[in-house]
Image (cartoon, coloured by chain):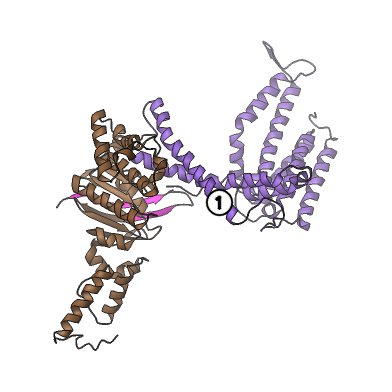
């Protein structure tokens, strides 16, 4: 598969030349593959937000290049706005950006800025509303009258309606209840399926990331601590712990077990995964094979 | 990304002026203002200049930063200067005369003195208040000084609380505004170019969410205050109790001495006096 977005030796410095100078990103190089879901994880101040702002041209790197489909997005700084239609960014708590009288108008805001014809805008509004699971009557309500979860999805639809090839979401499920979270992630998957888009999700929640991401990129202090398939990354929690992150509790337990010699076969992220893996081992022992092995492991 | 927003011109340090009691500094500001207008002779202006420089030194605020505040009023200074030069009625032959303007020797002196006064006034009050007193301290001090007014039914505490909250929320709201602007820019809004009408319309997409968020924040704050049983100023004690110390009186004494000095020096006629 080909890469859609590539960061080349990106360094970003805030307020250069002042006492507040701060290096947010330090010589980062990373590529995002077309059609994948990549999770960016890092603790507060690790440079996550700066990274996503660089991807859609909200910030200009101090040095290095951002390539979209092999082309430097800052080649023509005047038309950087067009990049934002191709790389959609949903900010944290996007519901605070809703402002039109109706949800319909708000979703149409982005496409209207793209100067699309009326009927195309109308079509996109209806289509994205369906993608995020908002019904027709919701479209005619005032965004401020919606529940928190619906507001969030309406705001996400506002970005999706521009049909970006790359959809970036910063903490898309923060502050929502489990059902709201599920609906948001369902909407993201639906969008990815419909448009073959590349998705980049920034999050703290390891559980969400483990389940939904193909790739993971761990940021620590403005550098990439690890990048690879999510299975591999979670298989070695030492990297995550080193970056000051919490791994899912069950993964941490499995890691502790493997440190003491009990290999669960594969990395586990959920309790049911772990139960299966443990059952697998127990089955093996009953069958009279090595069982716990000669390691002399005792619980 | 939002940088740390410093409110006003407060310059954090721990000089004599920084440590002085806020209420005393407010009073000293009034003394200083009066002092500026008491100066009438070249000698007393020299003392005023010396004293102002002394304040700069005592505050440990770099001269460069202090002069920055002068740059903001440079227009007012020039205006004062020009107005006084041309419109001061003088005695004897005018030095220059054209159309309705007459320039006298007195006018030049007066223009010089007046602009110099404004110059010292800005630096002095700036040093006493803006540079060395944090906005929170200023509010505390004003509240404390106005407290006697609450005896006649003026809700001093409520006013002070309102000022506090306003100050407290300036950085928060500017943060909010920044976030909303980035979000709308991500949806293709262009705030910095394009036709004027379009740009004004695009501001609506920021103002409405900002309005909504400030109402939400106000609501949340009100609830949070109620939850902590806030009921106004009645019987409320302060975390930071302000105390006038001996050193504050020493500073007051210095100010009064210099003020007296300027009055005395007004008697020395040298060059020109008003």
Residue that extends furthest to the top in the rendered view of this protein: B99
Q: Which residues are magenta?
A: A2-25
Image colour assigned to chain A: brown
Nearest the viewer among A289 and B147 is A289
Nearest the viewer among A111 and A225 is A111
Tell me where residue B127 appears, x and y as whole percent.
66, 45
Tell me where residue A176 appears, x and y as whole percent.
37, 54
Residue that extends furthest to the front in the rendered view of this protein: A137
Residue at numbered disc 1: B223
Q: Main secondary structure of the magenta part?
A: strand
Residue A236, placed above or below residue B164: below
Residue at x-position 17% and y-position 80% = A283
What's the chain of the residue with tag 1? B
- Give the quarter of the image for residue A48: bottom left
Q: Quadrant of the C terminus of chain A?
A: bottom left
In the rendered view, does B120 fall on the left or right side of B69? right
Question: Chain in purple?
Answer: B
Tell me where residue A79 appears, x and y as whole percent.
29, 35
Residue at x-position 74% and y-position 22% = B105
Nearest the viewer among B27 and B11 is B27
Residue A76 can be seen in this image: no
| Secondary structure of residue under mark 1 | helix
Tell me where residue A182 appears, x and y as whole percent.
30, 55
């Amino acid at each position: 598969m080909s890469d859609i977005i590539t960061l080349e030796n990106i360094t970003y410095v805030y307020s250069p030349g002042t006492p507040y100078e701060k290096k947010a990103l330090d010589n980062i190089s990373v590529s995002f593959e077309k059609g994948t879901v990549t999770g960016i994880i890092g603790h507060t101040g690790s440079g996550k937000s700066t990274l996503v702002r660089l991807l859609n041209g909200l910030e200009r790197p101090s040095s290095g290049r951002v390539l979209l489909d092999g082309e430097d997005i800052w080649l023509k700084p005047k038309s950087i706005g067009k990049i934002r239609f191709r790389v959609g960014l949903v900010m944290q708590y996007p519901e605070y950006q809703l402002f039109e009288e109706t949800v319909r108008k708000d979703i149409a805001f982005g496409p209207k800025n793209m100067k699309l014809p009326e009927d195309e805008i109308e079509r996109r509004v209806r289509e994205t509303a369906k993608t995020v699971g908002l019904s027709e009557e919701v479209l005619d309500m005032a965004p401020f009258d919606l529940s928190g979860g619906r507001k969030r999805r309406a705001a996400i639809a506002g970005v999706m309606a521009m049909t970006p090839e790359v959809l970036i979401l910063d903490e898309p499920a923060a502050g929502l209840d489990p059902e709201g979270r599920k609906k948001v992630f369902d909407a993201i998957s639906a969008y990815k399926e419909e448009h073959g888009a590349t998705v980049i999700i920034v999050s703290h929640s390891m559980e969400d990331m483990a389940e939904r991401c193909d790739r993971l990129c761990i940021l620590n202090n403005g550098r990439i601590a690890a990048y690879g398939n999510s299975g591999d990354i979670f298989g070695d929690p030492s990297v995550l712990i080193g970056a000051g992150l919490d791994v899912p509790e069950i993964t941490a337990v499995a890691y502790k077990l493997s440190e003491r010699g009990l290999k669960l076969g594969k990395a586990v992220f959920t309790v049911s995964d772990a139960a299966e893996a443990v059952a697998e081992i127990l089955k093996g022992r009953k069958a009279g094979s090595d069982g716990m092995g000669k390691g002399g492991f005792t619980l | 990304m939002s940088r740390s927003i410093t409110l006003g011109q407060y310059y954090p340090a721990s000089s004599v002026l920084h440590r002085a009691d806020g209420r005393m500094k407010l009073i000293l500001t009034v003394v200083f203002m009066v002092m500026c207008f008491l100066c009438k002779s070249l000698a007393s202006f020299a003392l005023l200049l010396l004293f102002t420089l002394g304040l700069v030194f005592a505050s440990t605020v770099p001269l460069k930063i202090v002069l920055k505040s002068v740059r903001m009023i440079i227009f007012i200074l020039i205006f004062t200067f020009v107005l006084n030069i041309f419109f001061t009625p003088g005695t004897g032959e005018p030095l220059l005369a054209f159309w309705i303007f007459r320039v006298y020797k007195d006018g030049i002196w007066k223009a010089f003195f007046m602009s110099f006064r404004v110059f010292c006034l800005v630096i002095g009050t700036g040093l006493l208040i803006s540079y060395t007193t944090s906005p929170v301290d200023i509010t505390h001090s004003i509240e404390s000084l106005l407290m006697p007014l609450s005896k006649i039914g003026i809700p001093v505490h409520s006013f002070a609380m309102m000022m506090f909250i306003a100050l407290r929320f300036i950085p928060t709201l500017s943060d909010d505004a920044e976030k909303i602007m980035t979000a709308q820019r991500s949806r293709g809004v262009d705030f910095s170019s394009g036709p004027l009408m379009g740009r004004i319309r695009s501001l609506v997409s920021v103002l409405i969410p900002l309005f909504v968020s400030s109402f939400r924040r106000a609501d949340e704050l009100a609830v949070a205050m109620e939850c902590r049983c806030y009921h106004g100023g009645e019987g409320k004690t302060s975390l930071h109790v302000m105390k006038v110390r001996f050193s504050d009186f020493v500073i007051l004494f210095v100010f009064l001495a210099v003020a007296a000095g300027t009055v005395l020096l007004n008697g020395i006629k040298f060059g020109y006096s008003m």
